[in-house]
Image (tube, coloured by chain):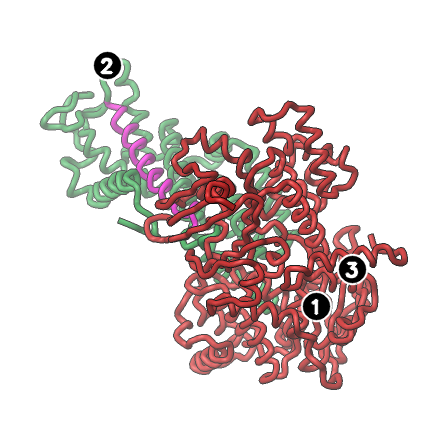
Amino acid sequence: MTSTEAKMDLLLDIKGLRIEAGASAVLADGIDLVLRRGEVLGLIGESGAGKSTLGLAALVYARPGCRITAGQILLSGKDIRGLNAKGRRALRGVRVAYVAQSAASAFNPAMTLMQQVCEGPLRHGIMNRKDAEANAVALFKALDLPDPANFGSRYPHEASGGQLQRAMVAMAMSCRPDLLVLDEPTTALDVTTQIEVLAKLRELIRDYGTAALYVTHDLSVVAQIADRILVLRYGKMVETGTTTEILTTPTSSYTRALVAERQAAMSGQGVAGAPRAATVLAVEDVTIKYGTLTAVDRVGFKVGRAETVAVVGESGSGKSTLAYAAVGQIVPAGGGFLFGETPLPPSYKARTADQRRRIQLIYQLPDIALNPRQTIGDILGRPVAFFEKLPRAAVRARVAELLRLVGLPEDFVTRLPGQLSGGQKQRVCIARALAARPDLVICDEVTSALDPLVAEDILKLLKQLQDELGVSYLFITHDLGTVKRIAHRVVVMLKGRMVAEGATAAIFDTPPDDYTRRLLLSVPEMRTDWLDEALKRRDIWRAGPATALA
Amino acid sequence: MKIGGHKVPVTAYIGALIVLLALIAILFAPWVAPYPQTKIVGGVWDPPNAHDLLGTDSIGRDMLSRLIFGGRTSVTIALVATTLTMIIGIGLGFLAVATNKIVDNILSRIIDVMLAMPILIFALMVFAVLGTSIPIMIITISTLESTRVFRLARAVAMNITVLDYVQVARLRGEGVGWVIFREILPNALPPLIAEFGLRFCFTFLFIASLSFLGLGIQPPAADWGSMVHDNAQAISFGGYAPLFPAGAIALVTIGVNLIVDWLLSIHALPSGTGAEV
């Protein structure tokens, strides 16, 4: 390739980019990035790494309060940072298009999908209505949306999450942009949906020869779609290289830790259980209804002492509902819970203080699980004082002990939750649950709001606490990697029903039913050829005996 | 200067200055005012002059002195009434959220009925039956205005009560008192403080309206609303005596409003959010 050809080939060239928020915060600094036509670059990093900010910079857009303060953004050799408002409008959607993380909140609920997908080409005067609609139908078809000719007449609420996400890709592609900025396009989707969206997205990008910036925190996902990867941390570039290089021979310690964390998540086979000890919690034929909708349908299993039982399922499977029923926040319509041998009253109001103490719940979002106006000392001291009725000095000593237990410094007692990081907040939540000296801790997606490395530390901590204190866990999660690392036993739920239950290793080795098998197949692995293999396996499986699954 | 991580806007300084000057004048009325409020010092509706800086009123009393003493009555009654309004409104609003659906429904429906009636008409009705005195006025105003506060307090508490930390306290078995005072109230304070300022303005104007109608504070004590009423005739003769008390009402209302605007703007922008928000 000659140098002029190489220049023609160069689509996006960002040099020395710096983005600031307010007076002091630097969101991105010293970013250099090159993207050729048809190439996909994965932007990887934890929350706050500046990856979304960088993705938006390709549209010369900064979120309210943020400013691009230095650097060049060249699109096909032209500096687009210098464009005025009109020039930027002509650029956005036409040459560079954006796909947001949550399609459900990005669509206008009052317009049909067709109107919204055609809006770009019509507004920019690229196509007339007839061509725009034909173009949209072709995109719907390419993205494997149901009934492509009529799909556009639906309103956003009439499409599922995965369909909406694909419709959003269609919207972004409607003007045939040179560059697509994808901001965590599959993160909000269930794994079994994610694989479909990912496959179609990759196909479309290849067919249209579109270049893409793919923003995500998930190495396994980006491995399937990106040619090169750029690792970001604290707004700075950590490492860049081809996908294979980053996955197999990462050079920086941060990237190595990220890769190792994923590998650990992939390779685990569950925790081999000792013979099952006495039952702590028995779930007996629990049925929970919201009005006429049955959220949980006759689910029953047991949690033994010092045992971890994971309840796995996709969104809407009723797993969190089950957790809330176990603590008495929701009253089941049928069945019930036994604590050891004693039946538990359905509502927490009817339970004794001791029954409430013995089952503790840790929530998904530590940000809203801690009262922002109470110090850590007050947050941890209250359950101690409430349940054990100790004098003040003894409470203080116990709080210090709890902080030590979860690996936080003792001087945190005077801090407010706002002064802590996400991982530290979750540690405080764990300490608060332990303050009650519970027999069973229910963990509701405790790691899903955390960055992978922080989540790994939290899982290790939970495991270590189980060894030290002999506490049992009921682990609600959608992430099979988590299950593999921590669970003795697994319960798989689908649409409120329990479809599989057993020792983790057994379930993972020989999935007893179709849904569990499909779920296991859909978890992305951290190698570049996984998606092709998974699709092949899926096709074989689909061609096989007819299944009852919708 | 920065408070709460945000720059204090100029308008807030202006508001604070107005409120501060008004407070100083009111608190130290006997020392600040040039004459006692009931002393007749000049002719009827004298224009402003070196002797009476803002002129005189309908029976020749010094306008400035009456304004300063009148402010005492107006502002004190408005403050007491607003405080009572907030206590009733917030108390009931939080109770509706922290207890159960039945209590919430009963309280909300009663308040809906109260909200359906115009405040001024309702107040006039009450005064017609019970007569006018300062305690009756304060209680009536607080009861009526608290229905508005109830709505806000209930909405704010509703948003907080669904958060996990409140659930944690409930599941632990904490009582209604703990949930209200330790979990909900501290987190609901910012919008409620702003509401206090806003409610003060409404109450202040409402009392002025009542006084103007002759139902508020009774003579010879001065208050700004009745001063407008007493001097209203001056307009017909080309005097501007009623403009001074009316202006004082407007000035204090604007001053408090400017501070409220600033308070609201602080809490509209959550500080310390993450880089990706």
Q: Is residue B247 magenta?
A: yes
Element under label 3? helix
Residue behind mark 1: A326
Q: Position of residue A512 (x, y in %)?
A: 83, 68
Looking at the rendered structure, whether the residues under marks 3 and 2 are on a common chain is answered as no
Residue that appears at 27% across and 37% down: B71
Q: Residue at x 66, y 74 (%)?
A: A268
The answer to which of A507 and A219 lies nearer the viewer is: A219
Q: Residues within 10 Å of mark 3 (few under 14, many from 20)?
A: some
Label 2 sits on a secondary structure element that is loop
A24 relative position to A457: left or right: left
Which of the 4 image quarters holds residue A135? Answer: top right
- Upstream in the sequence, badge 1 or badge 3? 1
Circle 3 is placed at which residue position? A537
Tag nearer the camera, 3 or 2: 3
Is B6 within the magenta?
A: no
Identify the residue at the far front of this view.
A2
- Provide the residue span drawn in magenta: B241-270
Distance of label 2 from label 1 (alpha carbons) = 78 Å
Give the letter of the green chain.
B
**Badge 3 sits on which subunit?**
A
